[in-house]
Image: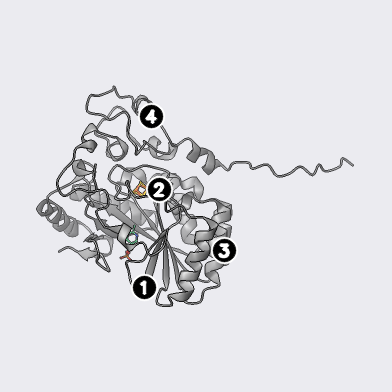
């Protein structure tokens, strides 16, 4: 018999990790991929680098500078303009940081920024200037978070946000989920993640196995802004999450030239429903520095929203909402 070689298990990267490692691209590469020429209005170098996964890039229609998916990741020089009313921390989250990596602005739920890393960089992101380096979640910080949860029994839900919490390794996720299982006051574990949309290969068998034994409510709020993002792979990932007990919700941001039309938003809701995802929030843009080119006047938004309501069954209409600094919940509009 051939002896079985007892080789150490090399840190073999999984398909999703390989995809993720390729997500950082230059403006030139992005334009080349999209079959577009360089333009004067585009920004070649930004601290907020360009990132997009192969799955997301493949959903972009080539040769169209106005593609709604491309526009979400394309940096314009105008991002550097200083505009009144736009700031680096529009929601004043820094002041709601009771300890590193936790935002406790809602009464019953805390937000944990477990990683600053995302699989895609959305130019409208309200955390694009968040001090992630200071908020990097170490093992030590996680221990403090568990401690915080044990002390604050009014907290019954933990929300993993980011950055994108699904960019964490399986080992980190597993460790955190196992610890949370031991805290009886925690009823719900929620994730806010764009990864099921931009990196559906992340939802693999190892990911599933982390949640198999969970006794908590599991909620995944995916973030999709346009039906074109939701291809067959995404649909499959959503179905897998659903079959593992996740309640699936979607949160979008209403963005100029991307989804500011009732037909586009209706199509998004219908496609989400195909994928087993319920529309949850349609969010107004947070006024973060560099995002002004996505903004819309409120009267335009409310008009689109009324048209949307007329097109869809009530349960497919997301709640129109905005986030306000120092408010304990989102503010609903109309
Ligand atoms: C709004 C929001 C939450 C929590 O709000 P709910 O009203 O409880 O859904 C958490 N994370 C993000 C990123 C949000 O935008
Ligand atoms: S936190 Fe969400 S919106 Fe911001 S860059 Fe990451 S994926 Fe995009």
Residue picked out by circle 1: 108
Residue under the point 87% across and 40% down: 2
Q: CA distance from mark 4 to mark 3?
A: 39 Å
Q: Does residue 86 appear to the left or right of 222 in the view shown?
A: left
Front disc: 1 or 3: 1
Circle 4 Cα neighbour tier, 10 Å, few/some/many (<14 / 14–19 / ≥20): some
Q: Tally the numbered discs.
A: 4
Q: Is residue 147 above or below residue 248?
A: below
Q: Quadrant of residue 246?
A: bottom left
Mark 3 crowd level (few <14, some 14–19, many ≥20, 10 Å Cα): few
Number of the front mark, 1 or 2: 1
Sequence-earlier tag: 3 or 2? 2
Residue designated by label 4: 26
Query: Marks 1 and 2, Cα distance to the nearest angstrom?
Result: 28 Å
- Dot 2: element: helix
Give the Cα separation between the discs numbered 1 and 3. Answer: 25 Å
Q: Nearer the viewer, mark 2 or mark 4?
A: 4
- Residue 183: percent from left, percent from top: 52, 73
Q: How many neighbours does mark 1 have within 10 angstroms: few (below 14), some (14-19), or many (20 or more)?
A: some
What's the distance in space between the residues labelled 2 and 4, CA to CA?
A: 22 Å
Q: Residue 93: give x, y in percent of width and height.
A: 31, 58
Question: Which of disc 2 and disc 1 is earlier in sequence?
Answer: 1
**54 lies above or below 242:** above
Q: Is residue 80 above or below residue 204?
A: above
Residue bearing the label numbered 2: 197
Q: Which residue is mark 3?
A: 212
């Amino acid at each position: 018999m051939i002896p079985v070689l007892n080789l150490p298990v090399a840190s073999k990267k999984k398909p999703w990790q390989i995809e993720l490692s390729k997500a950082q691209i230059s403006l030139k590469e992005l334009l080349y991929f999209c079959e577009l020429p360089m333009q004067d209005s585009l920004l070649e170098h930004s601290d907020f680098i360009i990132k997009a996964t192969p799955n997301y890039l493949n959903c972009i229609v080539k040769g169209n500078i106005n593609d709604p998916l491309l526009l979400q990741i394309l940096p314009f020089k105008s991002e550097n303009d200083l505009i009144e009313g736009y700031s680096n921390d529009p929601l004043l989250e820094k002041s709601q940081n009771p300890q590193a990596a936790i935002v406790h602005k809602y009464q019953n739920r805390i937000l944990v920024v477990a990683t600053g890393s995302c699989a895609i960089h959305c130019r409208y992101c309200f955390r694009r200037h968040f001090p992630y380096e200071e908020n990097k979640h170490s093992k030590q910080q996680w221990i403090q978070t568990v401690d915080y949860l044990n002390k604050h029994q009014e907290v019954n839900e933990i929300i993993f946000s980011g950055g994108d919490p699904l960019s964490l390794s399986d080992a980190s996720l597993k460790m955190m989920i196992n610890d949370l299982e031991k805290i009886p006051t925690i009823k719900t574990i929620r994730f806010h993640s764009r990864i099921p949309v931009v990196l559906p290969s992340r939802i693999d068998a190892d990911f599933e196995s982390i949640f198999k034994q969970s006794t908590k409510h599991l909620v995944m709020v995916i973030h999709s802004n346009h039906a074109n993002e939701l291809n067959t792979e995404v649909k499959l990932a959503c179905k897998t999450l659903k079959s593992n007990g996740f309640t699936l919700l979607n949160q979008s941001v209403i963005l100029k030239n991307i989804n500011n039309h009732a037909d586009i938003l209706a199509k998004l809701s219908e496609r989400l429903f195909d994928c087993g995802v319920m529309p949850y929030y349609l969010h107004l843009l947070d006024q973060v520095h560099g995002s002004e080119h996505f903004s819309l006047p409120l009267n335009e938004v409310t008009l689109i929203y009324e048209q949307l309501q007329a097109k869809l069954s009530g349960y497919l209409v997301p709640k129109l909402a905005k986030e306000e600094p120092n408010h304990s919940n989102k503010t609903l509009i109309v």
